[in-house]
Image (tube, coloured by chain):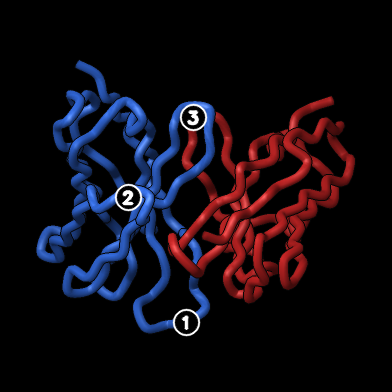
Chain colours: A red, B blue
Amino acid sequence: EIVLTQSPGTLSLSPGERATLSCRASQSLSNSYVAWYQQKPGQAPRLLIYGASSRATGVPDRFSGSGSGTDFALTISRLEPEDFAVYYCQQYGGSPLFTFGPGTKVDIK
Amino acid sequence: QVQLQESGPGLVKPSETLSLTCSVSGGSISNYFWNWIRQPAGKGLEWIGRIYAGGRTTDNPALKGRVTMSLDPSNNLFSLHLSSVAAADTAVYYCARGGIVGAPGLYYFDYWGQGALVSVSS
């Protein structure tokens, strides 16, 4: 099983600040196989980034993804009030076919 | 706009079978992968399995063969059956669309249902 580790567990920031979230895989991944989701309380996850760095339709350009191999990152350039949420990375490949990281909570400082 | 909606009992007894249906509107279920993902309260996401054209399926080995899925193209819906449930199966269950069958590079979930809370309790 490919295990994803996300850090930090919680990120406390103020609106307007930059957020950098990390996702590390237990083995090397193709960039095509990495995605990021945002989840707010009581809602389903929302796709933000696919293919490690491509923004999904309608996602603001303050969200960006980067990385390769085992280390990937999601960056929010300037936090807006609606960006405070939990963020999950996800990978494809191996068994099980899809796994998710444990999530990073971005909360208001 | 593609929309997904889960439906099914919110309470299932231990050892019985959990059954959920996902209705898809705004697009055909043909040619796509259709997935089930769950999330226990306050915890992370677990992929359960997927189904695609012709009823072909792949599921998570961690669920030890308890997963059955079916596809109903005539009604644009697909279903999940999880047998021999226990308290650990209590979660919000989501259906989600995956990539296009035969199109490489689409390894993510772009449309999700709102989720259905299923509790396992006697």
The image shows residue B61 at horizontal and vertical percentages of 35, 56
Image location (x, y in percent) of residue B62: 38, 50
Q: Position of residue A101 (x, y in %)?
A: 60, 49
- Side of A49 relative to A16 (left or right): left
Secondary element at tag 2 = strand
- Residue A79 visible in image: yes
Amino acid bearing label 3: Gly
Q: Secondary structure at mark 3?
A: loop
Query: Which amino acid does the dot numbered 2 rest on?
Result: Leu
For this view, does A4 lie left or right of residue B88? right
Q: Answer with the quarter of the image where residue A15 lies.
A: top right
The chain to which mark 1 is attached is: B
- 3 or 1: mark nearer the eye: 1
The answer to whether tags 3 and 1 share a subunit is: no
Residue B3, can we see it?
Answer: no
Amino acid at the residue labelled 1: Pro
Of all residues, the one furthest to the left in this rendering is B74
Say which quarter of the image contains residue B100: bottom left
Q: Marks 3 and 1, how far apart in space?
A: 32 Å
Q: Residue at x 52, y 78 (%)?
A: B105
Would residue A25 be found to the left or right of residue B91 on screen? right
Circle 2 Cα neighbour tier, 10 Å, few/some/many (<14 / 14–19 / ≥20) = many
Spatial CA distance of label 2 from label 3 is 16 Å
Category of crowding for the residue at label 3, using alpha-carbon neighbours closer than 10 angstroms: few (below 14), some (14–19), many (at least 20) = few
Residue that mark 3 sits on: A42
Mark pair 1, 2: CA separation: 23 Å
- Circle 1 is placed at which residue position? B104
Which quarter of the image is occupied by the N terminus of chain B? bottom left
Report the chain holding disc 3: A
- Mark number for residue B4? 2
Q: Chain of mark 2?
A: B
